[in-house]
Amino acid sequence: MAIPNQHRVFRLPEGNISSYKQLAVKLEPLEEIDKHEVLVRIKAVALNYRDIAICNGSYPLGFKTSLVPCSDACGEVVQVGSQVKDLQVGDRVISLFMQDLLYGDIKESDSSLGGAVDGVLQEYLIFAENNVVKIPQKSTMTDSEAASLVCAGTTAWNALYGLRPLKPGQTVLAEGTGGVSIIALQIAKAAGAITIVTSSSDEKLDFVKSNYGADYTINYQTFPDWEQKVMEYTDGLGVDYVIENGGIGTIQKSVDSLAYGGIVSLIGFLATLPPDQYPNVVMLANKKSAVLRGILVGSRQMEEELVRFFVTNDIHVGVDKEFEFTDEGVLNAYEYLSSQKHIGKVCITV
Ligand SMILES: NC(=O)c1ccc[n+]([C@@H]2O[C@H](COP(=O)([O-])OP(=O)(O)OC[C@H]3O[C@@H](n4cnc5c(N)ncnc54)[C@H](OP(=O)(O)O)[C@@H]3O)[C@@H](O)[C@H]2O)c1
């Protein structure tokens, strides 16, 4: 395959960023690969809430200037460096969120793709050999489905397997019907767990019940005291795992929904509260011997485990909609994700 010397790249401008509408596509030169690197032709990009938050100024972790956004890509290896051992031209690969985090806990330096370093919203990208994970040939996943495993998928896996592995028969509560929640629901169902999903919409809850087999659903707007419903559904025992996507605005209800000794994975920041209403998180954790565990996606080892789990069980990630890699398509994809009308993942095919 002929490698072009220029390709299309979506980049944010320098200086203040207040909207994804500032994203602009440009032709940029394609660099040469090094001996330990591979060149990947990007085929699909999965969007995350983080990509919206980076553009609207609400992302708490910072990002580089003139950023190429997005962390999650699936693509085809089109060139390999002379010292690359485990990859060949034609292999299908997905990106790794935390660059060079091969195993274990996150290190101090933030090396996140599409945040600390330029991301995947471009036609080609050079990766160090270790910064991609191969998708086995037998996989029936589409490129968008595979891309969706990178951030939302690895985060959900880390929540359920990163500290204390989920067991069949345990109960998992997932907040909302976005990417992290739906993938956590898919993993938990395949692992034989009982699942509870919350949402702002009855229509979305009907969909997750019939398409993903959620065992119990709760509309958190109709039932603002949804933790009481959780207790009802679990015979007063509470859940073993909470996929905590709300943050400070939902942590009290998450712990109130928890079984003694259960794990709340602190993942999202979707629900806010005025500081004078912040709950006493120390006492909340104490009274239930709860584990409140911060998560920042996960390692390459976790992503590999997740890929194996999805491929072995032939699970297809819940992708809601795909958009085109054009000015209009990319803006529409960002707008659709921002509208929170989606269930699962929103992707861009390149
Ligand atoms: N720490 C990490 O490593 C990590 C990794 C990935 C994502 N995240 C964070 O996790 C959160 C979810 O990410 P995502 O990419 O899955 O988002 P997403 O796909 O955009 O999903 C957002 C969904 O969350 C639900 N939601 C909105 N406000 C809510 C609230 N106040 N309480 C409960 N649910 C609410 C809505 O679903 P309904 O309409 O059904 O309620 C909404 O559609 C974000 O804050 C994101 O930044 C963190």
Image (cartoon, helix red, strand yellow):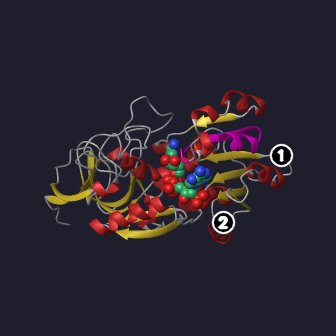
Residue 266 visible in the snapshot: no
Label 1 near ligand 1 (CB < 8 Å): no
Locate residue 121, reporting x and y percent.
31, 56
Q: Secondary structure at mark 1?
A: loop
What residue is shown at x 65% (from left), y 53% (from top)? 174
Image quarter of the C terminus: bottom left
Question: Do residues under tags 1 and 2 come within 8 Å of each other at their CB atoms?
Answer: no
Q: Quadrant of residue 331?
A: bottom left
Q: State whether residue 2 is above or below residue 220.
A: below
What residue is shown at x 67% (from left), y 70% (from top)? 206
Label 2 near ligand 1 (CB < 8 Å): yes
What residue is shown at x 83% (from left), y 46% (from top)? 237
Mark found first going from the N terminus, 1 or 2: 2
Question: Badge 2: few (under 14), some or many (20 or more) residues near its Cα, within 10 Å?
Answer: many
Residue 237: numbered disc: 1
Please, what is the three-letter code of the amino acid marked with disc 1?
Leu
Locate residue 338, reporting x and y percent.
45, 59
Q: Is residue 154 left or right of residue 332?
A: right
Please, what is the three-letter code of the amino acid marked with disc 2?
Leu
Locate residue 175, reporting x and y percent.
63, 52
Residue 205: numbered disc: 2
Residue 225 visible in the snapshot: yes
Q: Is residue 316 left or right of residue 174?
A: left
Please tell me which residue lies in front, 228 or 165: 228
Image quarter of the N terminus: bottom left
What residue is shown at x 68% (from left), y 56% (from top)? 220
In magenta stretch: residue 65:
no
Q: Which residues are magenta?
A: 251-270
- Report the mark closest to the observer, 1 or 2: 2
